[in-house]
Amino acid sequence: MSTADSLARRALAPLTGLLLFLQSALVVTGGAVRLTGSGLGCPTWPECTPGSYTPIANQAEGQFHAWIEFGNRLLTFALFFAAVATVIAVFKSHRRDLRFLAATQILGILGQGVLGGITVLTNLNPLSVASHFILSIVLIAAATSLHSRRRHPFVRTSSSHVRISRISLLHIFLAFAAIAIGTLVTGTGPHAGDVESPRLNFHITTITRFHSASVWLLLIVTFIFIFTKNLNYETRRWLYLFLFISIAQGALGYIQYFLGVPELLVGAHLLGSVLVWIAAWRVRLSVVRKPA
């Protein structure tokens, strides 16, 4: 292996770690945009305001809202450059098993740009906002896979663990469902990004109860999963971490609901959803793949 190839392999760990961090940070900063009512701080796309790609003085939407929204857009560029650097490192290190995952990051980020534009041009339609978030969740899963497989190639586990694999599939599905229903709660509630943006036509109490029920079902399956026989050490370790984060996230959800969804707690809950998803995805990876 040449010196360049060796350097590329060593670069995979920090680059995939940075990629995962930035994908997660994009969700959190997107939440900050919504929670500060800055969703239309830059009212046009791809420009921030007609005739300028950056906020301008005396902008009607206000400098604070404009820079919050613009900062979120800038983070997308940083994320894109990190994805390009990761793709280069993957190819230079001859990790053919990681090429598809690395490529999906670039394609997904470009898709995020398009979805972001649609979101702005539709005045923060809640379904568009939800799609923006769901795509981030998919990209975080791919980035998590990249980071977890950075050291060695991974192969699929044998079919002798079919029952465990089916439980883990149900587990990751319920985790995704809980997060997806959470986006409907957001689209119905007060923190949709702008006071004049449309809302989903759900009763907030009803959709919140659906979200809560999905979380309780996820926790029940998690307990069943933990007590399944023949779990490997890594799966059990990630399940315990997932359980701890999920219980904390559920408690935070109830607290924010009874306190009238204050912005800081909603932001913390959004960060918690990212951590829950990463832990759930690591559980799934530990079941279906092992080092080659």
Image (cartoon, rainbow, N blue to C red):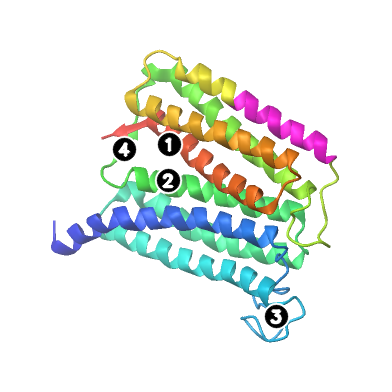
Residue 287 location in percent, x, y? 40, 28
175 left or right, relative to 231: right
Under mark 4, the amino acid is Phe
Q: Nearer the viewer, mark 3 or mark 4?
A: 3
- Image location of residue 92, percent across then percent down: 26, 60
Q: Position of residue 111 (x, y in %)?
A: 58, 60
Which disc, if any, is residue 282?
Answer: 1
The picture quadrant where one finds residue 52 is: bottom right
Which image quadrant for residue 273? Answer: top right
Residue at x 35%, y 49% (from the top left corner)? 98
Find the distance from the CA under tag 2 to the CA under tag 4: 13 Å
The residue under the point 68% across, 78% down is 63
Total marks drawn? 4
- Residue 156 location (% of width, % of height): 36, 31
* Badge 1 or badge 3: first in the primary sequence: 3
- The mark nearer the N terminus, 1 or 4, is 4
Q: Residue at position x 62%, y 34% from top?
A: 251
Looking at marks 1 and 2 on the same chain, the residue that comes earlier in the sequence is marked by 2
Name the residue tied to disc 3.
Answer: 49
State the image quarter where residue 288 is shown: top left
Q: What is the magenta range?
A: 203-218
